[in-house]
Image: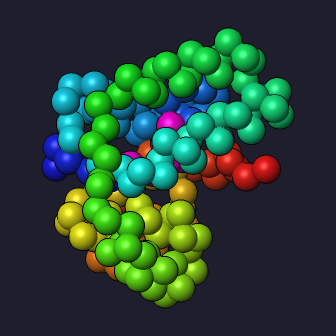
């Protein structure tokens, strides 16, 4: 199994909310804590922060749990893919259109394809699209949809 991978924002919820955890997501977090190289597009931080804030507003997280989650996640050693957004712009838009993804989800797929890395997610639509695009996938949860970060 590769020691480097792309991880999307949906995985963060499994790492900070026990009700969202799975054996797969726990194993992935252990790999990260042991030094696996994890690559994320810059939007990962904003998407995670928004999802946690929405969870707090919906009373799924307390203020204390929200703060603890931000602290725990900000402590992870993540590598931010710093490719010029203009370079990725066309590729990301094209992937989103081709696979019916949001541009945000397509950003993770674009990084995985460009860097030839597997992608870890709890989002079945993203994983299915990644497989169709030829990317390797790491499933972060055996069943159930990830929580929505929309509001």
Q: Residue 115 location, x and y as percent?
A: 21, 64
Q: How is the image coloured?
A: rainbow
Is residue 30 toward the left or the right of residue 92 in the image?
left
**41 or 143, nearer to the observer:** 41
Query: Would residue 24 appear left or right of 56 to someone viewing this image?
Result: left
Q: Residue at x 47, y 69 (%)?
A: 106
Quarter of the image holding residue 137? bottom left
As drawn, 28 above or below 75: below
Q: How many circles with numbers are drawn on the protein? A: 0
Q: Residue furthest top?
A: 64
Question: Is residue 108 in view?
Answer: yes
Residue occupying the point 61% across, 18% down:
67
Residue 132, placed above or below residue 77: below
The foreground one among 8 and 134 is 8
Q: Nearer the viewer, residue 103 or 122?
A: 103
Tell me where residue 75 sits by quadrant: top left
- Residue range in magenta is 7-12
In this image, 11 relative to 114: left or right? right
In the rendered image, residue 35, in percent from the top left (x then y), is placed at 19, 30
Q: Position of residue 71 (x, y in %)?
A: 49, 19
Q: Is 73 inside the magenta-drawn segment?
A: no
**Picture coordinates of residue 60, whole percent (x, y):** 76, 28
Residue occupying the point 62% across, 48% down: 146
The residue depicted at 59 percent of the width and 37 percent of the height is 49
Q: Is residue 4 left or right of residue 49?
A: left
Q: Quadrant of residue 100?
A: bottom right
Q: Is residue 57 above or below residue 140?
A: above
């Amino acid at each position: 199994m590769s020691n480097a991978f792309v991880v999307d924002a949906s995985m963060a919820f499994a790492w900070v909310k026990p009700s969202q955890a799975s054996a797969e997501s726990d194993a992935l977090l252990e790999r990260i804590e042991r030094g696996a190289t994890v690559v994320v597009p810059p939007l990962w931080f904003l998407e995670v922060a928004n999802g946690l804030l929405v969870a707090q507003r919906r009373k799924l997280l307390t203020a204390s749990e929200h703060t603890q989650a931000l602290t725990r996640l900000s402590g992870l050693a993540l590598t931010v893919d710093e490719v010029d957004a203009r370079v990725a712009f066309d590729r990301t838009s094209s992937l989103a259109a081709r696979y019916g993804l949001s541009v945000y989800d397509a950003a993770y797929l674009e990084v995985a394809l460009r860097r030839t890395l597997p992608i870890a997610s709890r989002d079945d639509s993203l994983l299915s699209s990644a497989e169709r695009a030829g990317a390797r996938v790491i499933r972060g949860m055996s069943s159930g949809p990830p929580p929505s970060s929309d509001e």
